[in-house]
Image (spheres, rainbow, N blue to C red):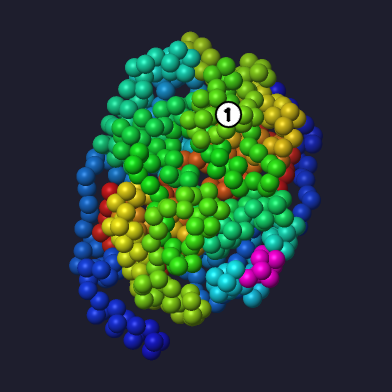
Amino acid sequence: METIAMRKRDLEGRPAASGGGPADQAGLYSRRAHGGKTIYGARVGILMLDTYFPRVPGDLGNATTWPFPVLFKVVQGASPKRTNAEREAWIIDAFVEAGQELVAEGADGLTTSCGFLSLFQDELAAKCGVPVAASSLMQVPFVERILPPGKRVGVITANTEILGAEHLEAAGASRDTPVVGAQEMGTAWPPSYIPREDPKWDMAAAEADLKAAGDKLVSQHPDIGAVVLECTNMPPFARSLSEHLRLPVYDVYSFICWFHAGLAPREFGHPGSAPREYRER
Amino acid sequence: MIQATRHERTAHGGMTVYGARVGILMLDTLFPRIPGDMCNALTWPFPVLFKVVRNATAASVAERSQSMREDFMAAGEELVAEGADGITTNVGYLSLFQDELAARCGVPVAASSLMQIPFIERLLPPGKRAGVVTFSTATLGADHLEAAGARPDTPVAGTENGVEFNRFIGDNDTRMDVAAAERDLLDAGRDLVSRHPEVGAVILECTNMTPYARAMSEALALPVYSIYSFVCWFHGGLAPRDFGHPGSARREWRG
């Protein structure tokens, strides 16, 4: 006890400019709040493709999925077909503009509702000025690093007719990453093909096709040590797929929870945390 | 279509302990580990398995003791046999053990918070870099960074000039002044960004720094990643969340 008391006296002699942490200032300033944006508490902004198919709990576009608040913004007119298949040039600009709006409103980081948008990563980050986690595919090199030697990551995508080497490279993954498309296994994927007039999705069929895609991936590549799911509609089935394949499964949910954990580190309370001024930026 | 069958309540075994997917290899220490520290069980939003590597100290890490290395490998293998599906450690410098631990234990290994550096750097706007706050800039070498996949010229600052954080850990003191430790951390963070204005996000190397990650993020107005963010992500793939109906159906139980 004595040594701690003596140490504290030493600390009190230090100039406040270099040593003055929030704990020191608790008495005077701890209830001052800092502004600079419109909406607080939601650190991740989600740029949504313009879709109408169902998004169940676990889907990136279902608000109950997230254990923290998020901000959604729909990029009007950016349908999956126009964005990913036809690649209309105006869409990247619309994403940038919507991303800038989200940042002005309160987002401190951005993500998107489509794994193919690794292609938008650099331009979004450059023009919105905040960290961007554009695609679940960006986890591929990170996951590969944690696997035992000789094991590699396999990707399951909603549509191999879209996913090419450029999407993988934009995500920092090697071009020869093993990929299987859930659309090869039946008619449930991709959900963007569901007709607008009758927006129903058979979740059991979607799960079965995803597991079949997983089976194909590991039978073709016995060295697969973990799976990354490209599509933001897949996290509802990640648990079931992980049990089925007996492999770790990473998806946009794991990615964005990690992303958020750095944007807003968890407050662990007493004694690590002291009263201090309130700020998000 | 997935059919519900009379087998759906079958449970599968094969190990001793269930429900704890991450195993944590720990140094043999007696200093306080408050909530937020990796080796306070309250820190984790999911169950974990701890294993203390006997006689492994901060000094043996700095000295790169070969016998300690072997003890870590053996302890990792024990954790996997008991039930862990992935392994981590409570020392950021043990990025040096990543490859051998993964090879020996045969499961995914998240040895060091430093391994997040290249991942974070990829998310930042152009011109921005990830910077590290470490326990000791003298101990943290280019080989620790390279083993974590980070560039050797990654901006780094240390708490070694502080008064409390390195003292209570170095002395293995059973008492610590938490407020003073926090000040040391924030000083190191301010030093990092004043010398390297290009830093766009901070990675905390040391697993005892996590309780102050929030305060540092607010003080520097930057994202701060730690062993907590890393292992929560790690766990998110080892045991993906079950979102329930309608995405999830009744099925056999596998731990």
Few, some or many residues within 10 Å of mark 1 (<14, 14–19, 20+): some
Q: Mark 1 points at which residue?
A: A175
The answer to whether residue B85 of the structure is visible from this angle is no
Q: Does A271 sit above or below residue B16?
A: below
Point out residue A231 in the picture as x, y percentages from the top left corner: 54, 28
**Of the pair A39 and B78, the residue shown nearer to us:** B78
Report the residue at 57% width, 45% height from top.
Answer: B236
Q: Where is residue A155 in the image (x, y as percent from the top left)?
A: 61, 31
| Residue A188 % position (x, y) | 61, 19
- Please name whichever residue, A127 or A65, is drawn nearer the observer in this view of the structure: A127
Residue B111 x %, y %: 58, 56
Left or right of A237 in this view: A68:
left
Q: Main secondary structure of the magenta part?
A: helix
Q: Residue at x 58, y 26 (%)?
A: A157
Q: Classify residue B23 as left or right of residue A23.
A: right
**Magenta part of the protein: which range?**
B65-72
Q: Which amino acid does label 1 sit on?
A: Arg
Seen at 22% across and 52% down, the residue is A34
One can see residue B217 in this view: yes
